[in-house]
Image: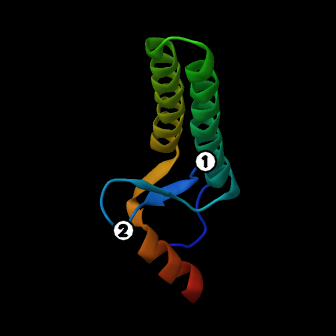
Amino acid sequence: MAAELPSHIWFVRSNGGSGSYPVRPEGWRVVWVFVGGVVISAVVALLLAAAGPTWLWVLAFLAGMAASAWYFIGTARRHTDYSIRYSDYLKDKKNA
């Protein structure tokens, strides 16, 4: 197994199971977009909580979280090599 991955592979399988772990800058960018979406959802929810009914901020928060998760999971699934665990990737990279 080579440490150099094809350019379309941004994630490998996490050590703990079927999740994805970023191994390229593009993968880390996807992670940070997800984190940004979570933060923005929380800020919007806080602003709406101060000015609107409870159902509105809860709905806004859930919609933002769902959109962020959908983006992350969908992108990670398209760009993950599930045949390589992260620990194997590190070992091969070190030995290359």
Query: In percent of the image, x 30 and y 60: which residue is there?
Result: 17
Vertical relation: 37 (above or below) 61: below
In the displayed structure, does residue 62 sit left or right of residue 35?
A: left
Residue under pointer 1: 8
- Picture residue at 50% right of the left edge, 44% below the top: 76
Mark 2 Cα-neighbour bin, 10 Å: few <14, some 14–19, many ≥20: some
For the point 52% across and 39% down, the residue is 72
Task: Tell me if label 1 and label 2 are in contact, CB under 8 Å.
Answer: no
Q: Is residue 3 left or right of residue 32?
A: left
Identified by mark 1, the residue type is His
Residue 7 appears in the figure: no
Label 1 neighbourhood size at 10 Å, few (<14), some (14-19), many (20+)?
few
Quadrant of res 39:
top right
In the rendering, at what x and y percent does residue 90 appear? 52, 78
> Against 49, is 19 above or below?
below
Q: CA distance from mark 1 to mark 2?
A: 21 Å
Q: Which mark is residue 15?
A: 2
In this view, the mark in front (1 or 2): 2
Residue 9 position, x and y percent, is 56, 52
Q: Earlier in the sequence, mark 1 or mark 2?
A: 1
x and y, in percent, of residue 84 in the image: 41, 65
* Secondary structure at numbered mark 1: loop
In percent of width and height, residue 12 lies at 47, 59
Looking at this view, is 15 or 96 the one in front? 15
What residue sits 32% from the left and 54% below the top?
18
Q: Looking at the image, can residue 39 be seen? A: yes
The amino acid pointed to by label 2 is: Asn
Looking at this view, is 41 or 93 the one in front? 41
